[in-house]
Amino acid sequence: MNRTTSPATVFRKCFEWEAAAKARESGLYPFFRPIGEARGTKVIIEGREMIMAGSNNYLGLATDPRMKERARAAIEHYGTSCSGSRFMNGTLALHEELEVRLAAFVGKEAALCFTTGYQTNLGCISALIGRGDHVVSDKYNHASIMDGIFMTVGLNRNVNVHRYKHNNMEDLEKVLAAIPIDESKLIVTDGVFSMEGDIVNLPKVRELADRYNAAVYLDEAHAIGVVGPTGRGVTEHYGNPDLADLIMCTFSKSFGSIGGFVAGDHMVVDYIKHFARPLIFSASIPPANLGAAMAALDIMQEEPDRVRRLQQIAQKMIAGFTELGFNVGTAETPIVPLVIGDDEKTFLFWKSMFERGVYVNPVISPAVPPNRSLIRTSYMAIHEDHELDTILEISGEEARKIGII
């Protein structure tokens, strides 16, 4: 920066922050690595082909030719952009067609599409929770849920925020019991937790919600396409679509696109449609992404074997890592964390895996609690057994060198 004076005060922190620069110098900086090409289960990074073991493309649809074709067809018909918000000129017939199908898919009356999954949580939570209301959140919920809570606190000030221990129903009941029975309250939880890979005890959440006069908002971002006999998520996993009042999901994972939706009672969804600021003041999902999401929904319904294969892979990898001596926590899905606990060892392990041609994700606080740093591995239905065996073999060899197992 060519300046004769020091940077403005507001920028001073930017020039003083050195953590990323030091990590780059040490060779342990894992973030923002550009992918040059995606080839199903393989990616090209820095000119090398690597096995992707860190993607949320759970059903392997992001590179499926049928998805690309539907995206192209949508562009041909509608162009490249809606050029406006859903509230004004940005609602297409394709939005509404997809919403009808999504509502039926998850067993609800109505659905509403947002531009991203992140905006879905921001918009829904901030629209529903007002002054004096209570929002009750699992401590391991995704950051987008917490940001939705922070947004409504910023907008309304007098919002009561409660957090309970991860998937701990006794602690949840303790929180609910302390809130007056006649005051508005919303329990918000992930269906499948994005770092732990475990499944919420939704039947118990529903039981407590009914007992203490609360509603249930379920984030199925990592569950739809992943759990349940046909991939309809945690409500299907437990066999009851009424376990959640509202179901939210993103298109950026199993759907192989980008966007998000919420589904529930018609009147509730219509209210969100008129009060969710991230919906009203943001351009709507581009046609190509709508077309791709529609194609993904078709494939999920026509090819349930993909879901079953993904669940088999999850069982194989959980068992394989456990046998090697890794701590996989409470994982029960194709999100399999390798809990290490030490940040330096976590980055060293990431680097050794990267150098051996396996792409995984290092995760440290605040994305996980302090002293719970981990390597997040995740799998696709299109992974082949020999690739999975390679991942396990390399993981075991490199973890032993570092002293992780």
Image: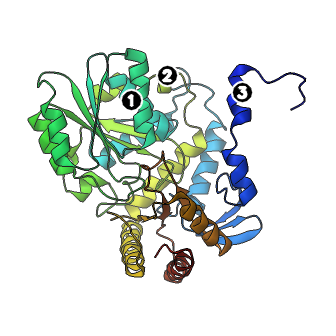
Q: Are marks 2 and 3 in contact (CB under 8 Å)?
A: no
Q: CA distance from mark 3 to mark 1?
A: 29 Å
Q: CA distance from mark 1 to mark 2?
A: 18 Å
**In this orientation, which residue lies closer to the viewer: 399 or 88?**
399
Image side of residue 223 versus residue 208, left or right: right
Q: Where's residue 95, x and y in %? A: 48, 36
First-in-chain label (2 vs 3): 3
Task: Using the image, tell me which numbered label, if any, was put on residue 12.
Answer: 3
Residue name at image x 68 percent, y 30 percent: 13
Residue type at mark 2 is: Ile
Tell me: residue 302, above or below residue 175.
below
The residue under label 1 is 149
SS label for mark 3: helix
**In this orientation, which residue lies closer to the viewer: 254 or 270?**
254
Task: Using the image, tell me which numbered label, if any, was put on residue 379.
Answer: none
Q: CA distance from mark 2 to mark 3?
A: 35 Å
User: Of discs 1 and 2, which sits in the foreground?
Assistant: 1
First-in-chain label (1 vs 2): 1
Tell me: residue 362, above or below residue 288.
below
Task: Using the image, tell me which numbered label, if any, was put on residue 280.
Answer: 2
Residue name at image x 37 percent, y 23 percent: 127
* Figure quadrant of residue 325: bottom left
Residue type at mark 1 is: Ile
